[in-house]
Image: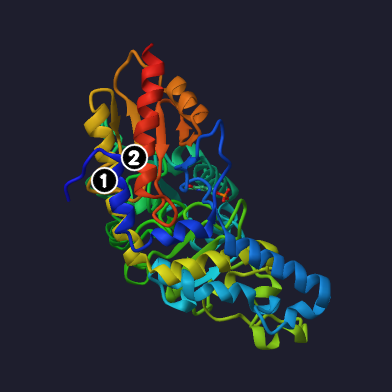
Amino acid sequence: MRFEDSREFAASLDQADPLARYREQFNFPLFRDGRAPVYLVGNSLGLQPKLAAQYVEEELGKWKDHAVGGFFHPDRPWLTCARSCTAGLAELTGAIASEVVAMNTLTVNLHLLMASFYRPTNERYKIVIESQAFPSDRYAAASQIRMQGYDTDVGLLEWTPRNGETRLHIEDLAALLEAHGDTVALLLLPGVQYYTGQVIDMAAVCELGRKHRCAVGLDLAHAIGNVELALHDWAPDFAAWCSYKYLNAGPGAIGGAFVAEKHCNPENLRQLHGWWGHDESTRFKMAKSFTPAKGAELWQMSTPPVLSLAPVVASLQIFQEVGLAALREKSKKLTAYVAWLIATRFGERIGSITPEDARGCQLSLVVKDKSINGKALFDRLCKLNVTPDWREPDVIRIAPAPLYNSFGDAFEFAERLDLALSQSTS
Ligand SMILES: *Cc1c(COP(=O)(O)O)cnc(C)c1O
């Protein structure tokens, strides 16, 4: 589509946007110095849906008025509240319902799932991560290797971009596995790379895992609620995600996990057990023996944290109403508009390391003009009530979220970037 660099044009896109009305279902941060917020870090912490606040209030009300009766309350009984997320999570991840469960937080889930699916032997104990892996994933993988008694220096293999590039090429992962595949126990890789915003070819990663008989775990922190996923068909062994980024469920909200259907028959699976993974129908008989629940719910351990689940339920309800296809359609247009505005206005000075042919919402901007200090520019943007985020050494990430960001936001970002740049060079 042809874009124009004007406020009127941005307004006309908003007028024609079937999802525009969702913007008012979210709480935005405050005005500062008379400037409306331009919030562009839905990839870091999504805005608060008004429905989330309502659902948390309702849970507090149940606790206040019914105390332990809340477990059996007719609306979202605490006993099964995690299950209120199942249909929504299955939809967003392209899984069948029995493959997904809302539980814990992301790094915790990575560990629990690695306890089952990282099964090192002396011949095959390595874990492949990408060289720019999110620190928590790197720490988690390294500590699993160490816990099993292997050497992290040898045990951690990195899929690395080519010299002078930031993009990960699937051919390079294939080559790494051709060379070392028979020593690799697990591929632990992201769906969307958090720093560059590159969408990884997850189907190809899963295929390579099967070819080389390595388990595959996907970290979907930056993928869920952002891009289309087809976990059931791709069939990684496991996946995990958090719910506070594109899913807008608030800081530390309950995350989720996927376990491939073929693993949902618990015989001979190594597994850490808790009473919430016990078959629900007999859980409260408090037997000494453990009867496994079916599907991914088997990995649950504890009483679900109701207050941190309520915003997830609310958020997924919005996603289900909108539908990922419609959301993605807007997202492509919105991100393309921001990218076009930046290229048109500032192409000489500002570039992006996010691949145009493999991206979701996010653009990772870099200052090309070496006379401009990237961090100072970022600080100026923040003063103008723009919220991007800064990633060392030189990246400004922005992620227009199609549920609540508008084309007007995109235009306003360009305006304030213009102002911040003029301040940088003056
Ligand atoms: C955000 C993010 C995390 C954060 O993990 P928590 O356990 O939720 O704090 C981990 N890994 C990746 C790739 C992330 O993007």
| CA–CA distance in space, label 2 to label 1 | 9 Å
Whether the residues at callouts 2 and 1 have beta carbons within 8 Å, the answer is yes
Query: Helix, strand or loop at disc 2?
Result: helix
The residue that appears at 45% across and 64% down in the rendered structure is: 238
Foreground mark, 2 or 1?
A: 1
Quarter occupied by the C terminus: top left
Residue 155 x, y percent position in the rendering:
46, 43
Give the total number of marks visible in the rendering.
Answer: 2
**Residue indicated by mark 2:** 411
Question: Can you say whether 402 is above or below 349 in the image?
Answer: below
* Residue 9: mark in rendering: 1
Residue 216 visible: no
Amino acid residing under circle 1? Phe
Residue 322 x, y percent position in the rendering:
40, 68
The residue that appears at 66% across and 68% down in the rendered structure is: 301
Amino acid residing under circle 2? Phe
CB at disc 2 and ligand 1 closer than 8 Å: no
The residue that appears at 56% across and 34% down in the rendered structure is: 32
Which badge, 2 or 1, comes first in the chain's sequence?
A: 1
Image side of residue 255 versus residue 23, left or right? right
